[in-house]
Amino acid sequence: MSCYLKWPDTSSLYGLRDRTILELIYSTGMRRSEVIKLETRDIQFDQGILLVRQAKGNKDRLIPIGSRP
């Protein structure tokens, strides 16, 4: 029996959502609970900043983000 992680099928909206979440967690180091609380108003694409509200220790933190190459 082999166990492996299958990459989400990006041909569906749910697969695209799942891939985005996986890439966000991997590239930023965000915790699952932080991703769950994330709202669209917390992402500032023009400034390249992601605001994580009430992270560990109930402190807000900013994460730099960039465009995908």
Image (cartoon, rainbow, N blue to C red):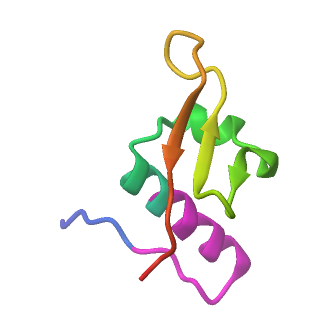
| Residue 56 spot, x, y in % from top left | 49, 17
Residue 27 located left or right of residue 19: left
Q: Which residues are magenta?
A: 7-22
- Quadrant of the image for the C terminus? bottom left
22 over 68 or under it: above or below? above
Q: Is residue 8 above or below residue 25?
A: below
Q: Residue at x 50, y 43 (%)?
A: 63
Place of residue 59 in the rendered image (x, y in percent of width and height, measured from the top left): 57, 15
Q: Which of the 4 image quarters holds residue 46?
A: bottom right
Any magenta on residue 24? no
Q: Residue furthest right?
A: 41
Drawn side of residue 54 relative to residue 22, left or right:
right
Front-most of 2 and 58? Answer: 58
**Residue 43: percent from left, percent from top:** 70, 52
Q: Nearer the viewer, residue 31 or 45?
A: 45
- Marks counted in the figure total 0
Q: Residue furthest bottom?
A: 11
